[in-house]
Amino acid sequence: MTPLLHAQGLVKHFPFRDSLGRARGAVRAVDGVSLSVPQGRVLAIVGESGCGKSTLGRLLLRLIEPDAGQLRFNGEDVLALPPAALRARRREMQLIFQDPFASLDPRMTVEAAITEPLILHKLHRGRERTRVAELLERVGLRPELARRWPHEFSGGQRQRIAIARALASEPRLIIGDEPVSALDVSVQAQVVNLLGDLIRDLGLTFVLISHDLGVVRQIADEVAVMYLGQIVEQAPAEALFHHPRHPYTRALLAAVPGQGGTLKLLEGDVPSPVSPPPGCRFHTRCPFAEARCHSEVPLLSGQTHLAACHLQESLPSPTPIREGAADARLARLQAYFTEHTT
Amino acid sequence: MNALDVEGLCIDFHTERGTLRAVDRLSFSVAPGRTLAIVGESGCGKSATALAILGLLAENAETSGRISLAGQALTPQAQRAARGRELAMIFQEPMTSLNPAFTAGEQVAEALRLHEGLNPRDAMQRAIAMLERVRIPEAARRAKQYPHQLSGGMRQRVMIAIALACKPKLLIADEPTTALDVTVQAQILALLDELKRETGTAVVLITHDLGVVRDHADEVVVMYAGRVAERAPTAQLFNQPEHPYTIGLLGAAPRLDSRRARLASIEGTVPDLRNPPPGCRFAPRCPFALAACEALPALAELAPGHWVACHRAPLDAVIAA
Ligand SMILES: Nc1ncnc2c1ncn2[C@@H]1O[C@H](COP(=O)(O)OP(=O)(O)O)[C@@H](O)[C@H]1O
Ligand code: SF4
Ligand SMILES: [Mg+2]
C-alpha cells in the first residue's frame, strides 16, 4: 500500500552571510531525511533543540522548499504541484504549533477562527455555525464559548481551539510541532488524551514533533530520532524504547529524569550544524566510538528497525528503562481520575 | 541547625483587580547538604516563595511569616546583605541573570572579589578554576567569552560557578534546567548534586517535573494554588502518595516503559486566586471530594515527616470501601 506521506532524501540548508554580504556557510538544518507514514499511523520525530525537527515538519508540508529530495502525499508529487493545486492540497494537511497564539488571530472570535477554513474550502455551506459547535464539542469545549476571544482562554483551551480549527478543514494528515510542550502536566495529559482519541476516531495520520519522550511514548506508533539534521534511528515505538540500537537514542532515554540517576551521562554539547563532525555525526559524544566512526559515515540500515551506527551489532545490551514499578494501589486511586471524567 | 526555616509564610499581591494570596501558610526547613524540592504547576506559588526567601518580590507584594537562614531571621536588610553570599540563586534563563557586557570569567571573578576580597588577577585565576570545576571545557578560553557566545547549558554552568563562588549556605534553583535539552539537564543536575555534596550547601529546587524530584530531592513539598497539598521525604511521597492532587499529577505523566491506556487527567483548571473556592482549593477538580471538603483541610502528619492536607486521607480507606 502506498504510504500517505513519503519523503526521500530531503535537504534544507540555511545559508548565512557576514556583514559584507559574503556567503559564510550554511546551517545544515535537514541533511538527507527519508521517511514514510502509512495512512492512520502516528510517526514521532524526536531530538534535541536545533536537530532540525521543526524544519523537517515544515518541509513535509512544503511550507518551505527543500534544496533537494522528493515528497509524495497520497502518491502525488507535492513538489511538482503548481501553487493553486498546492493550496487545494493544503486542506488535507494541517499544522498545530506549540504556541496556539501563533495560529489564533487575537482579533477573531473562536467562531470566526474556526469558520474561516470552512469558508475557504467551501465545507458545510449554510450550516457553518452548527459545524463550529460540533467541532468545539469534539475537542471538549462547550459550544457557547464560540463567541469568546482567544485571550479569554487558558493555554490548554487555546490549544483545543487550535486543534478544532485544524480539524475544520477535514485533513488527512496533521503535523503537530511540540503541540503540548508549553502546557502544565495536568493540562498536557488532557490534550494528549484528546489527540489520542481524535487520531483513533477520525483515522488521522499524525506526525508528532517533540523533544518529550514520555509524550512520544503515549501517542506514537513509530519513532524517528534525529541528530544534527539526520535520522539516526527509526523503529516501532515498542522496539525503540525497549531495544534502542543507536548510542544517541540510548543516551536520550537514559537522560529522562525519574529513573534513579545512576546513568552514564553524555559529555559536552551538540556540535554546530554549520560544520557537523565528519564520519558519524555523533562520534564526538559517543562513548563507544572507534577509529572508523571518525571518518566513515554510517548508513541507516535495517528492516523495520533502522539505525545508523557502525557498531550496532556489537554494542552491549541497552540499560532497561527504570520506571517505578506499576503500583496497584496507585493505579486504583488514579482510576478515579479517568473514570470520573469524560 | 537548619540552613533554612520557613514558618507560616504568606504572600499577598495587591493588584488593580484586588488582592490575591499567592502563598498561604507555607512552612518547611532544609538541612545543610540536603535538597528540598517544591513541585507544582504554573501559578502555584513556587517562584513567589523563592523570591520571598531572596527578598526580591515585587513592590506590590506583602509577606508575613518567618524566614531564617542558619537560625538568623531574614529581615530585608539581612536579605540584601546575604544575597550573592550566603544566599545564592540560579534561574531558568541564565541569559537574563548574566550581564551581556561582561565575559563569563569577569562575572565569576567579580563574585569572588566581592566575597573574598581578592585582587583582580587572583580573582580571574580562581574564576577559571571555578569554570573548570563546573566542567566547562577549555575554561581559560571560555572565560574570555561573552554570555551570547555560550550554549544554554554552558551559561547555566557559569551561573552555578557564580553562585558557588561565594560558598552559599543556601542555593535556590528555580527551574534551572527547564529551558535545557534532556541530556544537558542530566549533566547540570548531576553537577549540582556533586557540588552540594562537596560544599554542604542546602538546595531548594523548584521544578514542575516529578522525575527531577525523584532523582534529586531528599524531601518534597507539593503545592497547589498557593497551599501545601502534601509534604514528605521523597521515597515516601512516591511509594505512598496521599493527596489526590499528587496522585493526579503522578498519573498525568506518561511512562516510558509502556503506553498507558489513558493518562489521568485532572479536569478543569487551577482556581483564580482572587476568588478561590472555600475550603480545599483542589475540591472543584478532585474526584474524591465530599461535602466536608468545603471546609479547610488541616495539614496533618500521617506518618513521620509525611504531611497531608486532605479530608479523605489516608486514601486506603477509600479504596477499601
Ligand atoms: N529561517 C532560518 N534561517 C536560518 N537558520 C534557521 C532557520 N530556521 C531554522 N534555522 C536553524 O536550523 C537549525 C535547525 O532548526 P529547527 O528545525 O528549528 O530545529 P528544532 O526544531 O529541532 O529546534 C537550527 O540551528 C536553527 O537555528
Ligand atoms: S480535601 Fe476533599 S477535595 Fe480536597 S483533596 Fe481531599 S478529598 Fe479532594
Ligand atoms: Mg523546534
Image: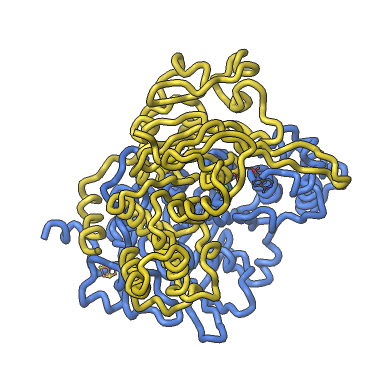
Chain colours: A yellow, B blue
Q: Position of residue A59 (x, y in %)?
A: 56, 44
Residue extending farthest left: B321
Residue B236 lies, in percent from the top left, at 33, 50
Compared to residue B55, the image places residue B164 above or below, namely above
Q: Nearer the viewer, residue B163 or A130?
A: A130
Q: Does residue B31 show up?
A: yes
Total tally of numbered discs in the picture: 0
Nearest the camera: A304 or A37? Answer: A37
Report the front residue among B211 and A46.
Answer: A46
Q: Residue at x 38, y 33 (%)?
A: A241
**In this orientation, does residue B299 appear?**
no
| Residue A128 occupies quadrant | bottom left
**Residue drawn at 64 percent across, 56 percent down:** B88
| Whole-percent x, y for residue A256 in the image | 46, 40
Direction from residue A335 to residue A34 in the image, left or right: right
Question: Quarter for ligand 2?
Answer: bottom left
Point out residue A152 in the picture as x, y percentages from the top left corner: 47, 76
Left or right: residue B164 versus residue A105 is right
B165 vs B317, left or right, is right
Quadrant of the snapshot with the C terminus of chain B: bottom left
Q: Please tell me in which quadrant of the rendered image residue B225 appears.
A: bottom left
| Left or right side of B7 for B254 | left
Dividing the picture into quadrants, the one containing residue A336 is bottom left
Residue found at x 55% / y 41%: A80
Residue at horizontal 51 percent and vertical 21 percent from the top: A309
In the displayed structure, A236 sits above or below B42; it is above
